[in-house]
Image: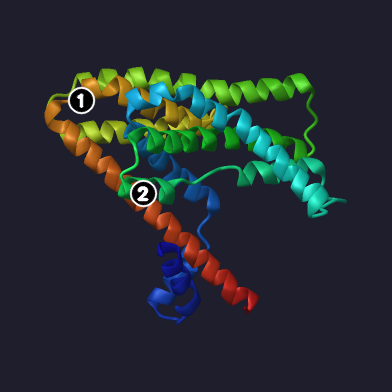
Amino acid sequence: MITVFGIVLGTFFHDDDRFGTAMRIWSEFDAHLLLYVFLPALIFESAFNSDWHVFRKIFWQVVMMAGPMLIVATGLSALMMRYILGYDGEFTFTACLLYGAIISATDPVAVVSLLKELGASKKISTMIEGESLLNDGTAMVVFFVLLDMVEGNEASAGDILLTFLNLSGGGPVLGIVFGFFVSFLLSKIHNNYVLEVNTTIVACYIMFYLAEFTALHCSGILALVALGLFMSFKGKTKISAESEHALHHVWGYVGFIAETLIFILSGVIIGERIIVSGI
């Protein structure tokens, strides 16, 4: 419904007034900026609010679905594009694999919400949400590795393997290191929920940008997942008892706002494309 609302805004509000101008500006929102502004908040909030004790019990099931099964899904999608839908020529098999990596990333928001309404077990909800967290990170790692190949960057099998290991292994290590650092900072703050909330938000974004835009060149998404799970496991013990409730509520609200804005912006962009294409 939120996306439909965005489509209505993007399709029918094209007057030269301030609102119509604002819709056109929003429809030209840079995709990379959208990713770098909203993704850290969404990933960290979901990992931080996960039940660590339940997640630990189903960890290997989640890893199996988000790792090997994602690679299988990527390969099957590529085979479908190549041999069933008939994409060939300039659309190489590597490009088909890249497409498979893109569509293999899952979004369980609606499913998890429905499971909560139906009173499903915490284990099932955590498994689906946990798989999505690791799935997003793994899909991005596979995407970047395949993107280099599609762009024609020559690399040996060893270089490709090294890049994959750096992206997939460096992120969790960085997240755990930041987890210890944030826990230490929180242990020095007493009954100041504003400062404690700001500490987690700033650390979340700084770590993501360090992972993605510095020589570390590791997966920012996996780093966020590791940081969020570490905070759920150990970091919560460093949060003041009077601040813990506020911290979870603020992060829950941040996640809600980020999801809502993303769906509205997606609808606005779709609506603008409908107008431009003349449908």
The chosen color scheme is rainbow
* Mark 2 vs mark 1: in front: 2
Say whether residue 147 is visible: no
Say whether residue 180 is visible: yes
Check the image and report above or below for 276 versus 257.
below
For residue 125, side relative to residue 191 (left or right): right
Q: Residue at x 40, y 80 (%)?
A: 17
Q: Residue at x 44, y 58 (%)?
A: 263
- Counting labels gives 2
Q: Quadrant of residue 6?
A: bottom left
Disc 2 is placed on an element classified as: helix
Q: Position of residue 52 (x, y in %)?
A: 34, 25
Disc 1 is placed on an element classified as: loop
Q: Position of residue 213 (x, y in %)?
A: 53, 33
Which residue in the protein does label 2 denote?
A: 113
Check the image and report above or below for 56 versus 26.
above
Q: Position of residue 4 (x, y in %)?
A: 45, 68
For residue 49, side relative to residue 217 (left or right): left
Inspect the image, locate mark 2, and give the three-letter code of the amino acid beneath it: Ser
Inspect the image, locate mark 1, and give the three-letter code of the amino acid beneath it: Ile
Quadrant where the image shows the N terminus: bottom left
Q: Position of residue 118 (x, y in %)?
A: 33, 48
In the foreground, 229 or 24? 229
- The label number, if any, that marks residue 239 in the structure image: 1
